[in-house]
Image (cartoon, rainbow, N blue to C red):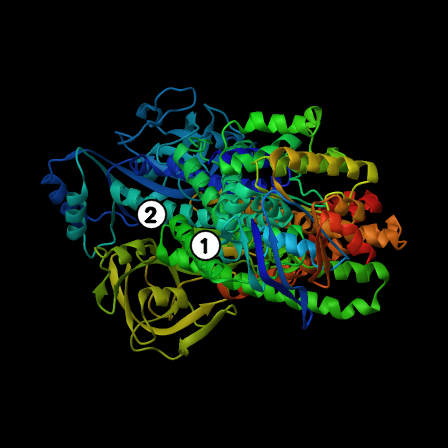
Amino acid sequence: MKFILNLTIREIRSSWRRLLFFFLCIALGVGSVVALRSLIQNLTKAVGTDARALLTADIELSSTNDFSPAEIAKIESVIGNSTIVEARNETITTAMMVRPADPSNESVKFVELKGIEPPFPLVGQFTISGGQPFDFALLRDNGAVIAEILLEDLKVKIGDKIRIGEGEFTIRASFDEEPGGTNGFRLGGRVFIEKKAFDSAGITRNTGRIRRRILFRTSDNPGALVRQLREALKGTTITTASYREQQENMGEQFTRTENYLALTGLLILVLGGVGVWNVARAFVEQKRKTVAVLKCLGAGGTRVISVYLLQILTLGSVGSIFGVGLAQAAMLFVKWRFVDAMPAKMTYGVSLSTGFQGAVLGVLISLLFSALPLLQIRTIKPKLLLRDENNSSMTNLDWTKWIFGIISLAGLLGLAVWQAGSWKVGVFFLAGLAITSVILYSAAAVLTWLLRRVKRFSSFSVTQAINSLYRPGNQTRIILLAVGLGAFVVLAVQSMQANLVREFDFSRNQKLPSLFFVDIQKSQVEELRQLLAERTGEQPEIIPTVRARVAYVNGQPFDYTNREVRQQQGQIGREFAVTYREKLDENESVVSGQWWTASAADVPEVSIEEDMAARLQVTAGDSVTFDISGRKITARVANIRKLDLRNTRTAFIFVFRPGVLEKAPQSFAATVLRHLGATDRQRLQRDTLERFPNIQIFDVADIIATVQRLIANFVLAVSFVGSFVMLSGILILIGSIALTKSQRVYENAILKTLGAKRRVLAAILFVEYGLLGLLAGLIGAGFATALSYAVSRFVMNIKWEFDPVGMLLGIAVTAFLVMAVGVAASFDVLFRKPLGTLRSQ
Amino acid sequence: MIQLNNVTKTVRSGSDDLTILDDVSLSIPDGQFVSITGASGSGKSTLLGLIAGLDEPSSGTIIVDGDEVTAQTDDKLAQIRSEKIGFVFQSFHLIPSLTAYENILIPMEILGLRDARGRATQLLADVDLTNRGHHYPPELSGGEQQRVAIARAFANSPKYLLADEPTGNLDSKNGQHIFELMTELHRQSKVTLILVTHDHAIAARAQRQVILKDGRVISDTLNNEIGDQISG
């Protein structure tokens, strides 16, 4: 043991530089796993730990309809029998236009308006700017408390007046963080007013998109009460939620996200493992003589392997710990760069357990990937000291290696399952990785084969460079696989982003409206039409809309006691804006059933968008009963319709055959296609609101800018991870260069002796790595193009365009990167004197 | 005693079998200084390697101090070498990542000897390298490296010292020095010394000289007969 320890320490002392890449591969992999896991864990902690505070209550009943007296009676009877309900309040929310009362201030802003009543909040704290607790008195007599960001957006200050709907409100305070305010995507900042002000400002009268909530605080587990409420409210449109279920759902979502991200980290770690494998091979190759000497001096194979295994373990451990440090640095980078995009309560530390888990993972990967190369030590015979013949058994796979190979694979599967938290996902991950690797590897094999075909037409330097790619022990295909994979990830998300952004580009997509007006009353239609025509120079399209919800499908209500149905409640239980018309729109096509003819129908008929039809599990001929302002209308499904969202002006999920809805209470929507400048848009919105305060205007350009920002952040995040994959590839490249460096030194010495100038040798070096990078870039760009095409066309249903500039740039950057790294890692070879090299051989 | 019985070594060379040693039988009593000479490719180094268990013969048996080295596992052979055999190579084969001192220490640590450090220091002094102990092999001259290799070979006080052209990579002055050092250590420790060499002058100073040609022993003479054999 003393011998093993002593020799390990001495070997590390002298070999640590050579094993630096081993160390870096592990550190980078562990860093990725730990950073990604920590990021999502901390996010969970920041936004997800307190579902109760998010809900601001223990139980929430919500509906987009006014609660009917019958429903209230049902609720009261359940609540009245409960002994655990401590407090109750009601809220009402909608999205609404807000503008300053001062006519000289032209700002106008879409906000999330919330009407509340005391006590508020039932759960959690609400602190206004300045640190005082929120006092309901601030809202009395048309007071408003608004998000701080809105002060800036609307160019107003505390004490100023703002107009919402038909009412005028005084800003009494602002706040930075509201209870239940961190979840989800929002159109605008939050504004609090008194609940009853919704009526006095005419908001409830004019707007359909209102959500009403009744909230309860309980003194004990509300599970039983929630079940009773759900039972009592069966068949109504009221959604019942409890913080415990929310917490469970969020917990599941976060765990799933965490595990998927951890798998991305594991991918980088596995690539790091490939680097480890390379370095370990190079290391064993370089240590062949030392191993032979040790064996000659009487050390047994097991003891010698122990020395190198201990060395790998030590470096793996130190690399892993360094990786945890890297992860902490990455978290601080996120804090520095993305603090604005993160929740306010976000922390940026790596937890001890995550760090430890990462370190264990790093050590295990070091072991799994170095086991096979280290096994080569067994086959090194001391006789090579007498006659350095090629040890033929070095390359043969014997049974021990097969067994160790299978154990390594099983170990890797175990790690994948552990990280994914699921057998299925773990197996899929490994299988997916294997299939991707085989495809990329095959592509690499084909490209290198083609390259070999063309070398006879090339110059001396190019011929030598291509020869170098086939140097024994060169990991050309593995490097192509790893670097290509990195380039593939980065280029694929870039290409998908380009297509997505193009989809939302006004200058190209003429059908996308720039302004969208809703809640237009019949009496306002003509006047608004005139105003819009005057300002935009085009006749706006005006469409009747009726608010309806689905009550029954084929005579059956939705069973929200079923968890799966409940999870879809947001999509199927909500209120829809439906319309009626004679003709199919140009962006629509019927996929099953028939579009109606002009002749009268015997029963009401409806056309349903195909995704919704799938969700409701209906086909043409089925019946759907709609609840329209309390009246039930049963319609036959005449056809299922496909909506081409790329070419859309409006997108109605349900379209009725004319003759049914004309008498129902309806409002109108209008779209303006013409793309106006930001100032003109704002002025038009402001003037419309002055004349028709009930109308809601969606500034589509504004919304799309927000979506584009989200996409950009997402792409940045994925590219960031992709660049780590690429970095792993580069490390493998460097490891491979180290592996074959002695051969290169020897070849260069011979070429110099034969008269090759340094300039020629440098050219060989540049061409070799330039070609390698070019091939990796081609592989990455080729597969990225294929993936972005498939995702755009078949998943996102958007138009796909090839991006030659982006792809060429990607290939060029990859080629340059690989060339720069390859040349930098081998440049010293050019300056070695040939005599010393030839003598030492 | 080292006993070789009908030892043959054949290797594949392309598609042909190449016989390196052909039915060699030898018996070397303990304490003897034997030189083995012969032209390049005559099988000298192979013979030495087979005795040390660095390779195995294609047929025949080799017995070293009662152990049949042709019927042992790799680990058992390593143990035999550790306890009984010292080996000096033409190209030194020091471990480049260890200092001169540590190179001498290694065999003793493998064997688990006590006071290995004291003995390593003494051995360094014996080969006159006390001040060079902390240097790494590439920092030493060829002669110095070979002296370290000799000290390393003697570290475990082996019964047999096998030297494969130990002066072959050195100039004549250094070569002479190394030879003197080995014969001196042989005299002092009564070790069996088997020396492979090209140098007839050195070979002539051995107690017994074996000459190989094309893998066969063509001459095996004691010291006073050598002159007659060569001239004859």
- Residue farthest toward the left in the current orientation of the protein: A81
Left-right relation of B37 to B80: right
A69 w.r.t. A395: above or below:
above
Kind of residue at disc 1:
Ser
- Label 2 crowd bin: few (<14), some (14–19), many (20+), radius 10 Å: few
Label 1 to label 2, Cα distance in Å?
Answer: 31 Å
A398 w.r.t. A222: above or below:
below
The x, y position of residue A493, in whole percent, is: 57, 54
Dot 2: chain letter: A
Helix, strand or loop at mark 2 = helix
Left-right relation of A185 to A293: left
Q: Which quadrant would residue B21 be assigned to in this image?
A: bottom right
* Mark toward the start of the polypeptide (1 vs 2): 2
Kind of residue at disc 2:
Glu
Helix, strand or loop at mark 1 = helix
Q: Which residue is mark 2?
A: A252
The x, y position of residue A354, in whole percent, is: 41, 37
Between A237 and A288, which is closer to the camera in this rendering?
Answer: A288
The x, y position of residue A234, in whole percent, is: 18, 55
Q: Which residue is mark 1?
A: A408
Please determine if labels 1 and 2 lie on a single subunit.
Answer: yes
Residue A100 appears in the picture as rendered = yes
Circles 1, 2 touching at the beta carbon (< 8 Å): no
